[in-house]
């Protein structure tokens, strides 16, 4: 599912920011897509923590091939050693199985998530083991389709900003915030295009 705000967001961003104007033209027809499953998005985000997009995709495909159907029950019931054989660290295996238990026990009240603002939902999600702010932000962008999330600590975003806005030099948090002011209320969309400029395949969670 493509976000309903995508067309408006790309039109406004293209008018405000020359870099994004070029990227939106370059990747015309591409868009962020939600897979519509909260558990899968969170699980995939955990797999992608602190590794490259390419490495994350490789590990995730091994998990999918091994587990077959990704559900809280299948991930919880499969042996830890089997998940480790997919290329997951011991810590990520623990996180995935803990996440599974939260969904199996139904202690997550998904019905309230749409009503919560971004910070409240991030707080709710980060109560779970292994879900830090970055993982919660990926969930907001890719599952909740929130339009204005800026994942400040995302390495890909920092690399793209350095490349496109700072002559390939390290970029400060202050400069990131200054540049991203132009993007409001569409910072998720701007971030997606900057990610897209780095990798041959779109980022997915």
Image (spheres, rainbow, N blue to C red):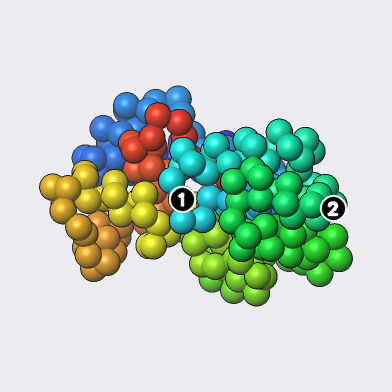
Picture residue at 23% right of the left edge, 68% below the top: 174
Q: Is residue 62 left or right of residue 72?
A: left
- Percent across and percent down for residue 33 are 57, 37
**Foreground of the two, 8 or 192:** 192
Q: Where on the picture, by quarter, is residue 126?
A: bottom right
Is disc 2 placed on a helix, strand or loop?
helix
Q: Position of residue 149 (x, y in %)?
A: 46, 58
Secondary structure state at the residue bearing disc 1: loop
Q: Is residue 126 left or right of residue 195?
A: right
Which residue appears at 36% of the width and 54% of the height?
155
Q: Which residue is drawn at the image coordinates 38% and 62% (left, top)? A: 152
Please tell me which residue is depicted at 40% across the width and 57% down the height of the picture: 154
Q: Are dots 2 and 1 in contact, CB under 8 Å?
A: no
Q: Which one is earlier in the sequence, the residue at label 2 or at label 1?
A: 1
Q: Is residue 109 visible?
A: no
The N terminus, quarter of image: top right
The residue where tag 1 is placed is 51
Q: Nearer the viewer, residue 167 or 3?
A: 167
Q: Which residue is mark 2?
A: 77
Distance between the alpha carbons at the discs numbered 2 and 1: 25 Å
Residue 173 position, x and y percent, is 27, 66
Quarter of the view holding residue 179: bottom left
Quarter of the picture containing the C terminus is top right
Q: Nearer the viewer, residue 70 or 162?
A: 70
Q: In this view of the protein, which residue sits in the foreground, 175 or 49?
A: 49
Position of 66 with respect to 92 (left or right) is right
């Amino acid at each position: 599912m493509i976000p309903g705000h995508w067309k408006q967001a790309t039109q406004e961003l293209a008018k405000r920011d020359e870099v994004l104007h070029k990227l939106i033209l370059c990747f015309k027809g591409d868009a962020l897509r939600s897979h519509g499953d909260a558990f899968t998005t969170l699980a995939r985000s955990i797999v992608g923590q602190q590794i490259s997009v390419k490495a994350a995709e490789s590990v995730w495909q091994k998990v999918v091939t091994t587990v077959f159907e990704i559900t809280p029950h299948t991930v919880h019931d499969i042996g830890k050693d089997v998940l480790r054989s997919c290329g997951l660290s011991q810590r990520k295996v623990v996180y995935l199985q803990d996440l599974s238990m939260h969904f199996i026990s139904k202690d997550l009240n998904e019905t309230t998530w749409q009503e919560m603002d971004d910070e409240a939902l991030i707080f709710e999600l980060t109560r779970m083991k292994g879900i830090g702010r970055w993982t919660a932000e990926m969930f907001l962008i890719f599952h909740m389709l929130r339009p204005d999330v800026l994942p400040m600590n995302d390495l890909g975003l920092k690399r793209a900003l350095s490349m496109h806005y700072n002559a390939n030099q390290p970029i400060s948090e202050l400069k990131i915030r200054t540049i991203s002011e132009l993007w409001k209320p569409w910072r998720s969309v701007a971030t997606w295009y900057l990610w897209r400029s780095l990798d041959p395949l779109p980022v997915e969670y």
